[in-house]
Amino acid sequence: MAEDLLIKQGSKEEKYLSIIPQIKGLLKGESDIIANLANISAALKEQFGWIWVGFYLLKNDELVLGPFQGPVACTRIRKGRGVCGTSWEQLKTIIVPDVEKFPGHIACSSLSKSEIVLPIISAGNFIGVMDVDSELLNDFDQIDEQFLKEILLILEGNVQA
């Protein structure tokens, strides 16, 4: 079955308000986490045009690259290393306005200028992170955090633990 997205122009909020119901539709009835992460990555990259949107999943005490859209990426990240590993260590969202100023930033792509990473917690267990990179400085804020958290809640409601 072919799926088409309606890509909305306008403010950041308008873009999220347009894409979130579409993500709900893509995930509806699908319990496979890999399929859902892949569709979330694609939908967000299409709507916002960010350089990289994807997920790292916890496996054997390290984050391992999961579904993503964008240039090739780092495959494994240890706890506390880079933005993703720090988000895991602190179990909180990290917004980085300028990746060059983040101590220990892992430069998977020299095009990345700003980043947001959100921990994914399901049934009280850490399962990975959502990672989004932009070619623009200071591209992420609390609006992104709010709506990306909402998307992660939709994900949690559609996957089997």
Image (spheres, rainbow, N blue to C red):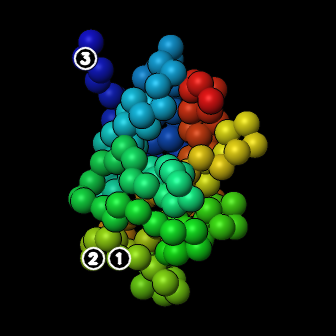
Q: CA distance from mark 3 to mark 1?
A: 35 Å
* Amino acid type, label 2: Ser
Question: Which quadrant: the N terminus?
Answer: top left
Residue 137 in percent (x, y) is at: 41, 75
**Any part of residue 143 in sight:** no
Residue 76 in percent (x, y) is at: 41, 63
Residue 95 in percent (x, y) is at: 57, 68
- Which residue is label 3 attached to? 2
Secondary structure of the residue carrying tag 1 is loop
Please say if 92 is above or below 112. above
Secondary structure of the residue carrying tag 3 is loop
Question: Answer yes or no: do the residues labelled 3 and 2 have beta carbons within 8 Å?
Answer: no
Q: Residue furthest right?
A: 124
Please say if 56 is above or below 84. above
Residue 19 in percent (x, y) is at: 45, 34
Question: Answer yes or no: do the residues labelled 1 and 2 have beta carbons within 8 Å?
Answer: yes
Q: Residue at x 43, y 55 (%)?
A: 64
Disc assigned to residue 107: 1
Q: Residue furthest front?
A: 60
* Amino acid type, label 3: Ala
Q: Residue at x 56, y 32 (%)?
A: 155
* Amino acid type, label 1: Ala
- Which residue is label 2 attached to? 110
Q: Residue at x 51, y 51 (%)?
A: 59
Question: Which quadrant: the C terminus?
Answer: top right
